Amino acid sequence: MSENINHILERFENCGENCELGFALRKMNNETAGLLRWAAVSPQALLNLLNMGYENLYRYENLVPINENMVEDTLYGLKFHTSFTFKEIDGEWVHQLDENARQVAYRQDLSKREYLAKKFWERLEDPQTIFVYKPYPGLPISEEEVNSISNALFAANKRKFNPNLLIVNQDGNPDTCGNVFQTAPFIYHGVIEKYVNNEDYELFDYAQWKRIMINANEIIKT
C-alpha cells in the first residue's frame, strides 16, 4: 500500500457504532490505535463522551460486564473490550479473575483508555481529522442525532473550528457504493452497499470502505 494511501487512512477516526471501520483499516494494514476503534458506541453514548469529557471515563465502579470480554461504562453508555474475563452463570456475567488479577487488568485497561482519550481530544483539534460514524444495522441514525453530534464535536474542540463528520450508511445499490457527498456544513455522507455481519468480519474485503475513504479525502479539505 502506497505512502499516499497510508496518509489518507490516518485522517479517519472511528466514532461508532461498532468496529467495522477498525477492521477496514486493518485490512489496509493500518493499526493506529483509537479510543473508539474497537468499541460499541450508540449516538447517545458518543454525545455523552463529547459533552462530559473523558475525566471520569472507565471508572471501575461504572463497569458492568455484558459478555465474555466486554464491559459497559454505565456513566457514558460506551462498551469496550476489556482484559477482564467473564462467564455467564444463571443469567449473570461473573468475573473469572481473582481480585488481585482483576485490579492489575483494570489498571492496564485504564492506562490505555486514558492515553487514547487524550489522543482522541488531540485529534479533535486537528483539522485534518475526519470523524466517522456508521450506524448499527437496523438502527438508522436520525438527522437530529447527526446534527447533535456535529455540534458536540465543535463544542468539544478547544480551537473552536468545526471538525468534519462523515456518516456512512448502507444503500444496497452497488452503483452508488463509495460515493461521498456533503449534506450540511461540515457533515458528509458516505455510501456502502451493505454492512458487514459480525460473523463475516474477517472474510469481508472492505473495498467499499477504501473507496469511501479515498473519495472523502478528495472532497473534505481543510
Image (cartoon, grey):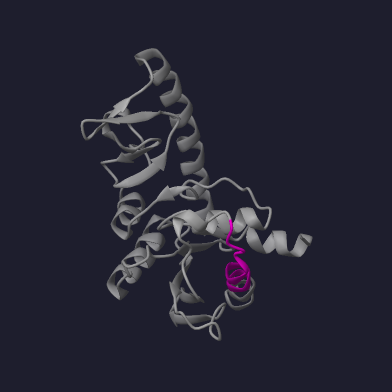
Bounds of the magenta segment? 203-213
- Quadrant including the C terminus: bottom right
Residue 28: percent from the left, percent from the top?
A: 67, 58
Query: Residue 85: which quarter of the image?
Result: top left
Q: Position of residue 90 (x, y in %)?
A: 21, 31
Seen at 61% across and 76% down, the residue is: 215
Please say whether residue 125 is visible from this viewpoint.
no
Instruction: Give me the residue at 63% from left, 48% from top.
Output: 31
Say whether residue 27 is left or right of residue 165: right
- Could you tell me which residue is drawn at 44 percent across and 19 percent down? 104
Which residue is drawn at the image coordinates 35% and 61% (left, top)? Answer: 152
In the image as oriented, which residue stretches furthest toward the bottom? 175
In the orientation shown, which residue stands out farthest toward the right?
2
Question: The N terminus lies in which quarter of the figure?
Answer: bottom right
Residue closest to the eye, 73 or 52: 73
Snapshot quadrant of residue 11: bottom right
Of residues 104 and 95, the one nearer the viewer is: 95
Asked whether, in this view, residue 127 is left or right of residue 83, the answer is right
Magenta span: predominant SS is: helix
